[in-house]
């Protein structure tokens, strides 16, 4: 018996010990269609007996057939059960939603670990199917994952601030709500662009006050 056909689950020594105490035929039958191996530590009906001892009894054949069938099925499902690929439509919509929220593909790539080129292909609709695990990583990215220090268009933030002021909140109160710890908090925001973290904080504040629309926070370059 050639050494390389030793089963992975037993030590080579054990194979010699068992096989040679129950000597195999001098020559393996060339057409082994009805060869039945002697009893050994391998029970009939185990694929190992079919492979290692060339047993072609009914149970051993069935074990081998079942194994082959399962292996073929599994080879079509590389991750063993879940579909290998899923449609990319929902993920593409998520990327659009993130983009509208100022989270661009570069940032999605950083957060999700999915390559920029793959994300570009999905966003452009060139890649229509993807692995479920890839989709999950992308779907796990939220608008909150945008870089806090990124500058976004200040207009929606100022609209909300004006709504807050119109509702009777003082600038000092708003500044304090936004995290200012100054004794006399003042709102000091640029008009054109504000930090994403500020935009989000104002959005949350406005929502807590029952104000504001669901205006996306858009990144500006
Ligand atoms: Zn058998």
Image: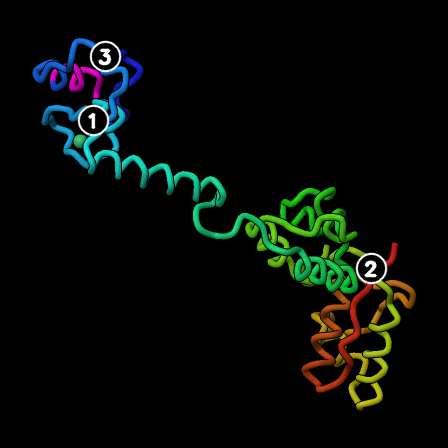
Circle 2: element type: loop
Q: Which residues are magenta?
A: 11-17
Which residue lies under the disc numbered 2? 219
The overriding secondary structure of the stretch rendered in magenta is: helix
Q: CA distance from mark 3 to mark 1?
A: 20 Å
Determine the residue located farthest toward the right in the rendered image: 192
**Dot 1: element:** loop
Closer-to-camera residue (150/130):
130
Where 158 falls versus 7 (above or below)?
Answer: below
Camera-nearest label, 3 or 1: 1
Q: Is residue 56 left or right of residue 70?
A: left
Q: Nearer the viewer, residue 70 or 126?
A: 70
Residue for point 44% across, 46% down: 80
Query: Disc 1 designates what residue?
Result: 34
Q: Residues within 10 Å of mark 1 (few under 14, many from 20)?
A: few
Q: Are marks 3 and 1 in contact (CB under 8 Å)?
A: no
Q: Secondary structure at mark 3?
A: loop
Inter-mark Cα distance, 2 to 3? 69 Å
Q: Residue at x 27, y 15 (%)?
A: 30
Q: Which is in the foreground here, disc 1 or disc 2?
A: 1
At x 71% / y 85%, what residue is drawn?
Answer: 209
**Residue 184 in view:** no
Q: Are marks 1 and 2 in contact (CB under 8 Å)?
A: no
Q: Which residue in the protein does label 3 denote?
A: 1
Of callouts 3 and 1, the N-terminal one? 3
Report crowding for label 2: few under 14, some 14 to 19, many 20 or more residues within 10 A (C-alpha): many
The N terminus - image quarter: top left
Q: Are marks 2 and 3 in contact (CB under 8 Å)?
A: no
Q: Percent x, y for residue 177?
A: 70, 76
Q: Is 5 on the left-hand or right-hand side of 156?
A: left
The location of residue 221, given as percent across then percent down, is 88, 54
């Amino acid at each position: 018996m050639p050494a390389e056909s030793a089963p992975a689950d037993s030590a080579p020594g054990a194979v010699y010990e068992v096989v040679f105490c129950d000597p195999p035929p001098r020559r393996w039958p060339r057409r082994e269609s009805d060869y039945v191996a002697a009893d050994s530590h391998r029970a009939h009906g185990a694929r190992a007996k079919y492979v290692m001892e060339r047993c072609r009894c009914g149970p051993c054949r069935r074990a081998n057939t079942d194994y082959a069938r399962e292996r073929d099925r599994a080879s079509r499902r590389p991750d063993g059960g879940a579909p290998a690929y899923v449609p990319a439509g929902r993920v593409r919509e998520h990327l659009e939603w993130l983009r509208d929220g100022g989270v661009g593909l570069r940032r999605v790539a950083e957060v999700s670990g999915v390559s920029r080129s793959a994300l570009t292909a999905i966003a452009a609709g060139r890649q229509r199917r993807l692995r479920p695990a890839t989709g999950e990583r992308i779907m796990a990215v939220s608008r909150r994952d945008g870089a806090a220090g990124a500058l976004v268009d200040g207009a929606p933030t100022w609209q909300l601030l004006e709504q807050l002021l119109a509702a009777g909140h003082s600038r000092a109160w708003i500044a304090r709500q936004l995290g200012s710890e100054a004794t006399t908090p003042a709102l000091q925001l640029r008009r054109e662009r504000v930090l994403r973290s500020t935009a989000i904080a104002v959005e949350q504040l406005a929502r807590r006050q029952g104000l504001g629309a669901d205006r996306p926070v858009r990144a500006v370059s």
